[in-house]
Image (cartoon, rainbow, N blue to C red):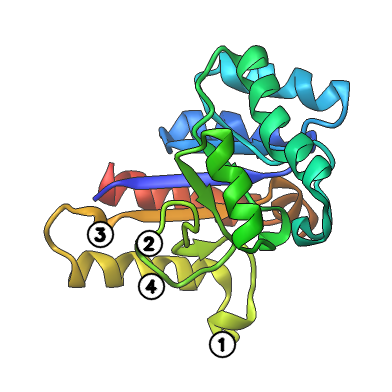
Amino acid sequence: MKIQSSWDDFCPQNLKLAELLKEYKIPAIFFIDIGSSEAKHQVKILADMGFEIGAHTYSHPQDLKLLDDIELKHEIIDCRKELQEITGQEINWFCYPRGRYNEMVKSFVIEAGYKFARTTKVEVPWSFDPIEFYTSFHCFNRKEYNNKPWFNYAKDWLKFIDTNFKKKSEASDIHFWGHSWEIDKYNDWEKLEKLFKFIKRRYL
């Protein structure tokens, strides 16, 4: 089973998260909005640490669907070009800020050359549209979890996939995500480390 995590937004706690990911060898993509010099510096640090970088626009707009063509070009196409210059990586992933997009937004993602674009939708073990990639779970308490704490939901979801998809295939991939600022705000670092330990022991 392939395990992938991704982490959104620029914030100082990303570096603390990166150390934890390295310790437990959890694959990760960082989606960081690069509208400040501090964010660009952090992207360079994370890339140098060996993490994959994905695009998350410059300004993290509330809703990409409300932008005009010039703004979309800047936030999606120009952002990829600059990230490639900063990191030396081919930037293959885009993440829709707040998970808001439509077919027009997707067309700019495709034009920019991204291979994948991640949404904020959960409870789906795989996706058929690479430019509308769903996720397995979010490390945050959500209404979709029916009042179950995110940590318990995550473990149950991993066990469900393990039980129902025995063969290694795209249908058994896990892609979970979060924000380091949410982990910090709700003091969930201990829970996150327990999740990483669980994943490393069971799947890596």
Q: In this view, does 131 lie to the left or right of 141?
A: left
Give the farthest residue toward the bottom: 146
Q: In this view, does 147 lie to the left or right of 126?
A: right
In front: label 2 or label 3: 2
Mark 4 residue type = Asp
Front residue (pair 194, 101): 101
In front: label 4 or label 2: 2
Q: How far apart are marks 2 and 3 (CA)?
A: 11 Å
Task: For residue 15, say whether it is visible.
Answer: no
Q: In this view, does 176 lie to the left or right of 9?
A: left
Q: Distance between the residues labelled 1 and 3?
A: 23 Å
First in sequence: mark 2 or mark 3? 2
Mark 2 residue type = Ser
First in sequence: mark 4 or mark 3? 4
First in sequence: mark 1 or mark 2? 2
Point out which mark residue 172 bears: 3
The residue depicted at 67 percent of the width and 14 percent of the height is 86
Compared with 153, 61 (above or below) is above
First in sequence: mark 4 or mark 2? 2
- As helix, strand or loop, the secondary structure at mark 3 comes to helix
Mark 3 surroundings: few (<14), some (14-19) or many (≥20) residues within 10 A: many
In front: label 4 or label 3: 3
Mark 3 residue type = Ser
First in sequence: mark 1 or mark 3? 1
- As helix, strand or loop, the secondary structure at mark 4 comes to helix
Point out which mark residue 127 bears: 2
Q: How far apart are marks 4 and 2 (CA)?
A: 20 Å
Q: Name the residue under label 1.
A: 146
Mark 1 residue type = Asn
Residue 32 percent coordinates (x, y): 70, 36
Q: Name the residue under label 4.
A: 156
